[in-house]
Structure formats: C-alpha cells, structure tokens
Image: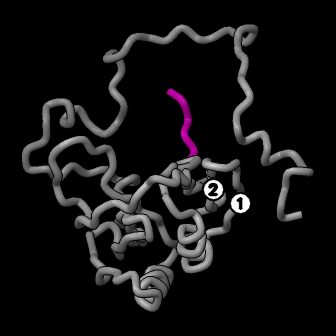
Amino acid sequence: MPKYCGVNHLAMVTGDMDSTIRFWRDLLGLRLVAGLGHPGYRHYFFEISPTDLLAFFEWPEAKPLPMRDHGYPVAGPIGFDHVSIGVETETDLWEVKDLLAAAGYDPSEVIHHGFIKSVYAFDPNGIPIEFSFSVPGADPRHTPAMADSAPSRICLEGPDPQPGHWPKPTPTPPSQRRDYPGEGKDVLEEDRNKWK
C-alpha cells in the first residue's frame, strides 16, 4: 500500500479571492504560499502546516454556499460537509474562537467531542469550517474504536485495509513513467514572482 503523508491540499472555490485572502491569511494567519492565475482564473494556496495546504480556485461566477449546520443531512448531489483544521493547543482553539468572534464570524461555543474539542464557523464563501484540538491521550488513530450502534458488515472487518477486494495493479515500468507540464510550473519561474 502507498504511504500517505497528510493532505497536500484541499481545493475549495471562491468568487472573491480578496475576501478569501483577508479571512484565511490576515484573520486566521495562514501564509499565502503560492498563487497561479491569469484573467478569469486563479488558484491560490494557504499553508496550514509544514505538510498541509488549503487551496482556492477563484471562479468569477461562483456564489457563497447557503449556510447550513455542520453535519446536518441534506438530500441531492453533495460531496462535502465541512473541513476541520487542527490546532496545536487548547489555547490556540480559544484564540481562533476569539479571532472569529471579533471579526463578526459568529463561531460556535467550544464543543467537547471526547477525542477532540472543536469550534465551528463559516468562511466568507459560506464554507463550513471547524477548528479542532486533539484531546491528549484520546487520539483514535492510536486506539481505533467503532461506536456506531449499527455498523455495516464491511465496517466490522476492522480498521485496517482488507486485501483481496480490488484487482492487483500492474506497476508502470520506470521506462514508461512520464509527467506533463501543469499550471504550477509558473510558481518556480523567478521572473514570474510578483513578490520579488
């Protein structure tokens, strides 16, 4: 199995990159580390941690999401509920809550979920966001637990990947491995950097 090292980036959508920058960079303190674009298209990346990024596409016709409670079931097409960003300490969680409140973003109270404590809010795009502090000694990654009162048969197979359910892949030989240029190459071109 491949080894994963975090969420490289989660790509969201905004119709207003400037308000998105003001919220994520200037209010919450996430560094804006890369920006790609041309008229009608932008793709900007904010640093959450040394291994995780939050990205936004700016699509001029995009509108903010309608507000709905985090985790509230909806019908119809949907592929996303909310994003939770970890904070290092409980003090950091309270600091985020205070920042959001001072800026008029109406954060929730601190909710204690047993293994995490969380604050909920919405960004300027209506994206449901959560900030979570992992409770020391209660990380389910160390001791997985299933407390669903009616788990499925497949779920009951356990927390670890179960082999034999998918076809075995044929590895691509090194001689056939190639990649193709994408938009991000512009970030590496010194003469394109507007901050220098």
Residue at mark 1: 33
Q: Nearer the viewer, residue 71 or 39?
A: 39
What crowding class fits label 1: few (fewer than 14 Cα within 10 Å), some (14-19), or many (20 or more)?
Answer: few
What secondary structure characterizes most of the magenta part?
A: loop
Q: Which secondary structure, mark 1?
A: strand
Q: Could you tell whether 34 is left or right of 86 in the image? A: right
What crowding class fits label 2: few (fewer than 14 Cα within 10 Å), some (14-19), or many (20 or more)?
Answer: many
Q: What is the C-alpha distance between the residues marked 2 and 1?
A: 6 Å
Q: Residue at x 34, y 53 (%)?
A: 143
Is residue 133 located in the magenta-colored stretch of the structure? Answer: no
Q: Residue at x 42, y 64 (%)?
A: 125
Q: Which secondary structure, mark 2?
A: strand
Q: Residue at x 33, y 26 (%)?
A: 162
Q: Quadrant of the C terminus?
A: bottom right
Query: Which label belongs to residue 118?
Result: none
Look at the picture and state if 46 lies above or below 187: below
Is residue 5 located in the magenta-colored stretch of the structure? Answer: yes
Q: Could you tell whether 18 is left or right of 192 in the image? A: left
Q: Amino acid at mark 1?
A: Val
Q: Position of residue 78 (x, y in %)?
A: 27, 45
Query: Which label belongs to residue 45?
Result: 2
Q: Amino acid at mark 2?
A: Phe
Q: Position of residue 44 (x, y in %)?
A: 63, 55
Is residue 118 something one can see in this rendering? no
Q: Are marks 2 and 1 in contact (CB under 8 Å)?
A: yes
Q: Could you tell whether 121 is left or right of 183 in the image? A: left
* Range of magenta residues: 1-6
Q: Residue at x 71, y 9 (%)?
A: 176
